[in-house]
C-alpha cells in the first residue's frame, strides 16, 4: 500500500512539473489518503502483535 502512495506522489510531482494542476492535485490527494490508510493499518497491526505477546520478528 505504501508503494501505491509513492506512485501517486510521483505522478503528482510529474504532473505538477508539466503544468497539469488538476491532475497533480487529485493524485496528491489520493496519495495522502492511501498513506493515512497505510499508517492506520500499521498501527493496528503493531497493537495486535503486542496484544498477542509477540514482539516484532527480527
Image: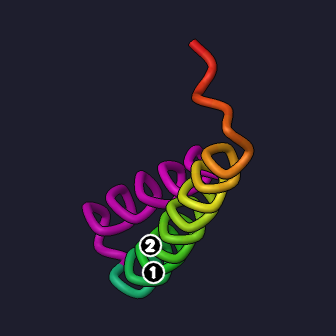
Q: Quick one: 30 or 2, which is closer to the camera?
A: 2
Q: Looking at the rendered structure, which numbered label has been put on residue 29?
A: 1
The reply, left or right, for residue 21 in relation to residue 1 is: left
Query: Was residue 5 drawn as part of the magenta stretch in this picture?
Result: yes
- How many residues crowd around disc 1 within 10 Å: few (fewer than 14), some, or many (20 or more)? some
Residue lying at the far bottom of the rendered structure? 22
Query: Was residue 27 drawn as part of the magenta stretch in this picture?
Result: no
Q: Quick one: 11 or 53, which is closer to the camera?
A: 53
In the image, residue 32 sits, relative to residue 51, either above or below, namely below
Q: CA distance from mark 2 to mark 1?
A: 5 Å
Q: Quick one: 19 or 43, which is closer to the camera?
A: 43
Residue lying at the far front of the rendered structure? 53
What x and y, as percent, mark residue 13? 32, 59
Q: Please name the residue shown 58% across and 44% down the image.
A: 3
Q: Please name the residue shown 49% across and 70% down the image.
A: 36
Which SS does the magenta portion mostly show? helix
Q: Please name the residue shown 50% across and 61% down the image.
A: 39
Q: Please name the residue shown 40% across and 65% down the image.
A: 12
Q: Looking at the image, do the residues carrying marks 2 and 1 touch, with CB atoms under 8 Å apart?
A: yes
What x and y, as percent, mark residue 26? 48, 83
Q: Image quarter for residue 25?
A: bottom left
Q: Quick one: 24 or 5, which is closer to the camera?
A: 5
Q: Which residue is mark 2?
A: 32
How many numbered marks are there? 2
Query: Which residues make up the magenta segment?
Result: 1-20
- How many residues crowd around disc 2 within 10 Å: few (fewer than 14), some, or many (20 or more)? some
Q: Secondary structure at mark 2?
A: helix
The reply, left or right, for residue 15 in relation to residue 3 is: left
Amino acid at each position: 500500500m505504501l508503494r501505491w502512495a509513492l506512485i501517486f506522489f510521483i505522478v503528482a510531482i510529474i504532473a505538477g512539473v508539466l503544468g497539469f494542476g488538476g491532475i497533480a492535485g487529485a493524485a496528491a490527494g489520493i496519495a495522502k489518503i492511501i498513506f493515512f490508510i497505510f499508517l492506520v493499518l500499521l498501527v493496528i497491526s503493531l497493537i495486535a502483535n503486542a496484544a498477542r505477546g509477540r514482539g516484532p520478528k527480527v
